[in-house]
């Protein structure tokens, strides 16, 4: 019986040794193709995972860092609490109310700024903020690649050649990806578990199956979009439209109310109501089976304005500013109208 145990132990040792040798051979073969510090693919992955600082340029005029939310500001004397990224449009809407005034924004300090590498710094005054801008954002252009994004989670196998330990690391977001790539060492053999999905700036997805494919894809699309690193917060509005063209657009089909928000209150009861702008200046609104009549006009005072007047539905009765228009491939165009923080979002409904 003892002899049998000895034989089994010897066989187990031989088997484990053989498996270990095969495992080391696999690792050795992958060293040349794995992720290594200071290589092109790692540099591209670091830049793709950097934090974009341009999204809040309407507040800080700096693309190399962003302000941590929530933050309170005063836009042309009106207090605005920015809780989410969509709230930046509130400031833009206030600024766009007039083309003749001087827009002014004051930040309520202290704030926390987040740099592209995700480090955070507390800032206590405007002079301090300007100092960070001058010392870090001289070019006005940040280094991050915004035209392509990773789709998470991404699993990377990591073998430590010093300790001979193998681990799988699951990466869930850009910060984790950035930190992982920055901490790569020559003693580590890191391999992505493909396939890996990338999301392009036009909304399409692409699958990569090797490091070479991943490198060439990122390199090919990195300049395919406008990264909007300037401080022109109006350049995404797509409001370059003539007065008559705007009128024709409104009267071409009926429009469904996708959202009506007044005084920070979203009026769900008006959602999906149908507005028909007749070419003779009259309009009708169908709400929950009832029809309401009114009128509409278009003016060009401080940009295109749509004035709606419905006697029994006063929530619509504003001189709405044409804020944004999106031409959708399915024909269901979207229009965004604003008055300060109030907004009316419409979707074309030709049925």
Image (tube, rainbow, N blue to C red):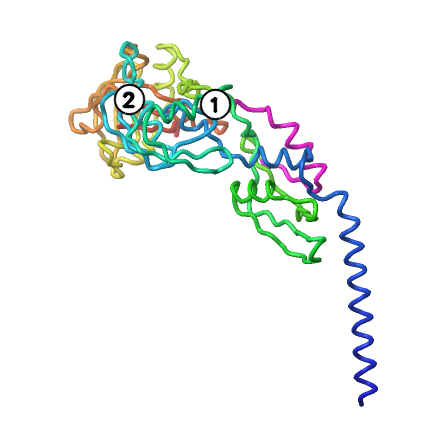
Relative to 24, residue 46 above or below: above
Quadrant the C terminus occupies? top left
Q: Residue at x 38, y 29 (%)?
A: 347
Q: Quadrant of residue 335?
A: top left
Magenta extent: 205-226
Q: Residue furthest left?
A: 311
Residue 327 appears at what percent x and percent y?
45, 23
Q: Determine whether, in the image, residue 238 is placed left or right of residue 305.
A: right
Nearer to me, 341 or 27? 27
Q: Is residue 222 magenta?
A: yes
SS for callout 2? helix
Nearer to me, 268 or 154? 154
Q: Quadrant of residue 241?
A: top left
Q: Quadrant of residue 323?
A: top left
Nearer to me, 57 or 242? 57
Q: Which mark is residue 137?
A: 1
Residue 224 appears at what percent x and percent y?
59, 24
Q: Residues within 10 Å of mark 2 (few under 14, many from 20)?
A: many
Q: Residue at x 26, y 36 (%)?
A: 266
SS for callout 1? loop
The number of numbered badges drawn on the structure is 2
Q: Earlier in the sequence, mark 2 or mark 1?
A: 2
Instruction: Quote the CA–CA distance across marks 2 and 1.
Output: 27 Å
Q: Nearer the viewer, mark 2 or mark 1?
A: 1
Q: Which mark is residue 13?
A: none
Q: Is residue 123 magenta?
A: no
Q: Residue at x 28, y 22 (%)?
A: 94
User: Which residue is tagged 2?
Assistant: 94
Relative to 262, residue 185 above or below: below
Q: Determine whether, in the image, residue 193 is placed left or right of residue 148.
A: right
Q: Determine whether, in the image, residue 55 is placed left or right of residue 182.
A: left
């Amino acid at each position: 019986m003892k002899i049998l145990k000895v034989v089994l132990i010897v066989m187990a040792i031989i088997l484990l040794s053989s498996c270990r040798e095969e495992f080391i051979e696999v690792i050795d073969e992958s060293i040349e193709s794995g992720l290594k510090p200071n290589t092109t693919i790692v540099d591209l992955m670091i830049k793709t995972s950097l934090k974009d600082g341009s999204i809040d340029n309407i507040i800080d005029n700096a693309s190399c860092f962003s302000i941590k939310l929530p933050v309170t500001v005063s836009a042309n004397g009106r207090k605005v609490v920015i809780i989410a990224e969509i709230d930046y449009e509130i400031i833009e809407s206030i600024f766009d109310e007039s083309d003749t005034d001087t827009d002014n924004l004051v930040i309520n300090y202290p704030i926390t700024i987040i740099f592209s590498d995700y480090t955070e710094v507390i800032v206590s005054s405007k002079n301090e903020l300007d100092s960070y801008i001058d010392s870090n954002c001289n070019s006005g252009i940040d280094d991050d690649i915004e035209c392509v994004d990773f789709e998470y989670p991404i699993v990377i196998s990591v073998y430590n050649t010093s300790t001979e330990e193998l681990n799988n690391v699951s990466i869930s977001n850009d910060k984790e990806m950035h930190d992982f790539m920055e901490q790569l060492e020559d003693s580590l053999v890191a391999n992505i578990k493909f396939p890996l999905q990338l999301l392009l700036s036009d909304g399409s997805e692409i699958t990569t199956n090797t490091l070479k494919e991943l490198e060439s894809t990122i390199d090919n699309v990195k300049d395919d979009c406008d990264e909007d690193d300037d401080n022109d917060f109006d350049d995404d509005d797509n409001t370059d439209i003539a007065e008559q063209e705007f009128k024709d657009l409104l009267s071409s089909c009926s429009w469904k109310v996708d959202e009506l928000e007044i005084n920070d209150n979203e009026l769900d009861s008006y959602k999906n109501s149908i507005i028909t702008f007749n070419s003779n200046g009259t309009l009708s609104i169908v709400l929950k089976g009832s029809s309401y009549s009114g009128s509409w006009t278009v003016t060009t005072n401080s940009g295109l304005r749509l004035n709606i007047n419905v006697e029994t539905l006063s929530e619509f009765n504003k001189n709405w500013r044409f804020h944004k228009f999106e031409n959708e491939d399915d024909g269901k165009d979207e229009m965004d109208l604003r008055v300060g923080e109030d907004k009316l979002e419409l979707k074309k409904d030709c049925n």
